[in-house]
Image: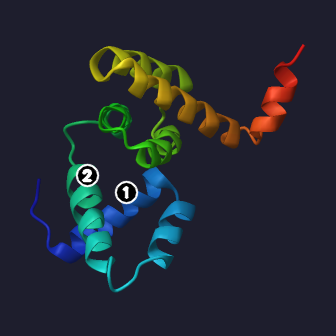
Amino acid sequence: MTPMDENKRYQQGMKIRRAVLGDEHVDRAVAATTDFNRDFQDFITRSAWGEIWARPGLPRHTRSLLTLAMMVALNRSEEFRLHVKAAFNNGVTRDQIKEVLLHSAIYCGVPAANSAFHIAADVFREMDGETKSNSKKRRRP
């Protein structure tokens, strides 16, 4: 990989960040940038997105699956929710997410996977335009 200067790494990172997380999320993060968190936002754009996610060794699809499993292991529900949505931008299917969560139950623990299943189901409902109450009403006999 050709070495990049920090500005090029930032630009590449922002491009990948937008492709994976979506413009809406990135625009919110950029709008919420303050003097306090500006260095952190710059750091994650350059390092996580411009360096690691840009590496050619793994496709984004695989990186999404790995990220989901790591968020389960670390019990990072907010980041897990974000990356469930992002995974679809990388071609990950609901069935593949289910398999990651089942696999995570063995290696990360059933409670962690159980929580992740609930969060993923909520994200799927949001993506399908449903609310929890609509989903529950439809299931009733």
Alpha-carbon distance for marks 2 and 1?
Answer: 7 Å
Name which quarter of the figure residue 106 lies in: top left
Q: Quadrant of the C terminus?
A: top right
Mark sitting on residue 6: none
Name the outermost residue toward the bottom. Answer: 35
Q: Is residue 62 visible?
A: yes
Q: Secondary structure at mark 1?
A: helix
Callout 2–callout 1 Cβ contact below 8 Å: yes
What number of labels is visible? 2
Residue displayed at 33% across by 76% down: 37
Q: Is residue 55 above or below residue 140?
A: below
Residue topped by disc 2: 54
Name which quarter of the figure residue 130 lies in: top right
Name the outermost residue toward the right. Answer: 141
Residue displayed at 32% across by 71% down: 41
Give x and y (percent) for residue 138. 86, 24
Residue topped by disc 1: 16
2 or 1: tag closer to the N-terminus: 1
Other-residue count near label 1 (Cα within 10 Å), few / some / many at <14 / 14–19 / ≥20: some
Residue displayed at 25% across by 36% down: 58
Nearest the viewer among 81 and 45 is 81
Type of amino acid under label 1: Ile
- Residue 7 is left or right of residue 92, and the answer is left
